[in-house]
Image: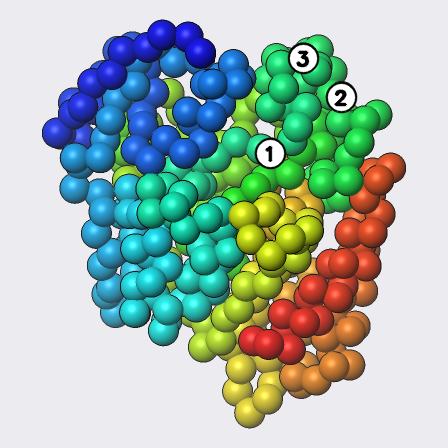
Amino acid sequence: MQPFSYAKVSSQERAIATIEQDKTAVFIAGGTDLLGLMKDGVQTAKKLIDINSLPLADIEFQNNGVSIGAISRMSDVAFHPQVQECYPVISQALLQSASPQLRNMATVGGNLLQRVRCGYFRDPVFPCNKRTPGIGCAAITGHNRMHAIFGASEHCIAVHPSDLAVALTALDAIICIQSVEKSRRISIHDFYLLPGETPEIETVLQSGELIVAIEIPNFASKSHYLKVRDRASYEFALVSVAIALEVEEDIIKSARIAFGGVAPKPWRGWETEEFIKGKPINLATFTAAAEVAIKEAKPQTHNEFKIELIKRALIRALSNS
């Protein structure tokens, strides 16, 4: 692990200005992903700017939704009574993320920015276009059981690891970003980028910008998060499904559906949502919706099983919503 300096800041303006002036510096809050990447030699930083003293940990409910500060701890959000009542999909996603110890340290902003869990990316021995552009993707011809079946490119097939991001995608969350000169509010759908020819660029976040909050509008009367994984705890998703529904007299008035573990970004099921709109809540509707959900799937050599897994997970998630 390369040596680095450390500075703790007490103002948002100073934190952002420091990063803007020094391109070798990075923000750190929980550090649960960043420090691992630095130890593995995948990411380098000559200076860590500790933002834990910034006033960005509030969870504020308003008439039109909730605002969650970017350095709110995952466990605090997951166990917040109003979050559990109004947005169960968020609580469920967080409680199925990592271990209790990591949830107590990790922040929601950091969770959204965590890097992919592709073994070829995490090990500098192997070529990886995301780590070093232009040297190739070892996963395409390697063991790719955990990799993408939607949205991949010839340059990268890694999947986004965040459970929370999938839940927030189903809720049409807004990412609030601050820089020295301006603030931005970006839909989570636009925040993450598909790999295309530039897999090293994962989000629209620019140098010197800091995520300060996540805003979530009121929408669903029913929501649910289902995660399918190899073991029951501390494991990343093979497939996950986040569901947010508006239901009236057993008819689906509107729906938002997002999938995890299957694409380089949280994968929104736009066609599936449109298909089930106006249909009754029953097994026939859910089964037909599952066929719509997998129409565009393009599996890799070792993960064709994810197609059937998505179908079954969606049916189960809709049945439990």
Q: Pointer 1 and pointer 2: residues touching (CB < 8 Å)? A: no
Q: Nearer the viewer, residue 156 or 161?
A: 161
User: Sequence-wise, which precedes: disc 1 or disc 3?
Assistant: 1
Q: Is residue 250 visible?
A: yes
Residue 77 locus on image (x, y percent): 33, 56
Q: Amino acid at mark 3?
A: Val
- Residue found 45% across the figure and 35% down from its top: 113
Q: Amino acid at mark 1?
A: Arg
Q: Amino acid at mark 2?
A: Ala
Residue 117's label in the rendered image is: 1
Secondary structure, mark 2, is helix
- Residue found 53% across the figure and 82% down from its top: 247
Which image quadrant is residue 294 in? Answer: bottom right
Q: Residue furthest left?
A: 10
| Image quarter hosting the N terminus | top left
Residue 138's label in the rendered image is: 2
Rendered position, 182 above or below 257? above
